[in-house]
Image (cartoon, helix red, strand yellow):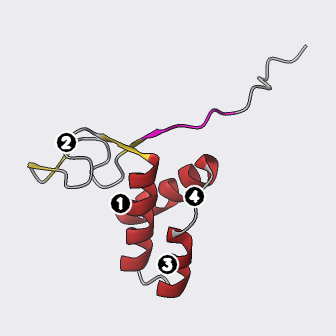
Amino acid sequence: MSNISIVPISATNNWECPECGGTGSIDEEICPICLGATWINSSDAAEWLLNFMQSSGGHAAEIEQLRKETPDSLILALCLGICSAIKAA
């Protein structure tokens, strides 16, 4: 018997805010992305990700194409983690 779960990772609808790192504030001001709630929904997370990519010099036409799609939750989690790490660096 294996103790490894075969249940797939469930999709999430709530994401820790990547702008404030889940604190709800930035420099003692309410976070403009989560409005102090510390969590955002999937569409807000995807929007933050695309805005971050664009502000980091991403190709505008490719980003606009991505805005028309709904990302898979696992891909969104991976991309949010990478962009959050880049932002923190």
SS for tag 4?
Answer: loop
Was residue 6 drawn as part of the magenta stretch in this picture? Answer: no
Say which residue label 2 marks. 36
Q: Nearer the viewer, residue 50 or 68?
A: 68
Q: In x, y percent, where is residue 62?
A: 55, 81
**Distance CA(mark 4)–CA(mark 1):** 26 Å
Is tag 2's residue or tag 4's residue first in the polypeptide sequence? 2
- Location of residue 24 with respect to 29 vertically, above or below: above
Give x and y (percent) for residue 56: 40, 78
Residue drawn where x is 46% and y is 58% of the image: 46
Locate the C terminus and report the quarter of the image it occupies.
Answer: bottom left
Percent x, y of residue 70: 57, 58
Relative to 1, is 69 above or below? below
- The tag earlier along the polypeptide, 1 or 2, is 2
Drawn side of residue 4 relative to residue 12, left or right: right
Q: In the rendered image, which residue does mark 4 sit on?
A: 70
Magenta segment boundaries in residue numbering: 9-14
Residues under labels 1 and 2: Cα distance? 19 Å
Q: Which residue is mark 3?
A: 64
Query: Looking at the picture, which amino acid does disc 2 mark?
Result: Gly
Callout 4: few (<14), some (14-19), or many (20+) C-alpha neighbours within 10 Å? few
Q: Earlier in the sequence, mark 4 or mark 1?
A: 4
Q: Residue extending furthest top?
A: 1
Q: Given contact means CB atoms under 8 Å apart, are the residues at marks 1 and 2 in contact?
A: no
Neighbourhood count class around disc 3 (C-alpha, 10 Å): few under 14, some 14–19, many 20 upward: few
* Kind of residue indicated by mark 3: Glu
Q: Which mark is residue 88?
A: 1
Tell me, yes or no, whether the two marked residues, 4 and 1, touch with CB atoms within 8 Å: no
In the orientation shown, which residue stands out farthest toward the front?
68
Determine the residue positioned at 24% across, 38% down: 37
Tell whether label 4 touches label 2 (CB within 8 Å): no
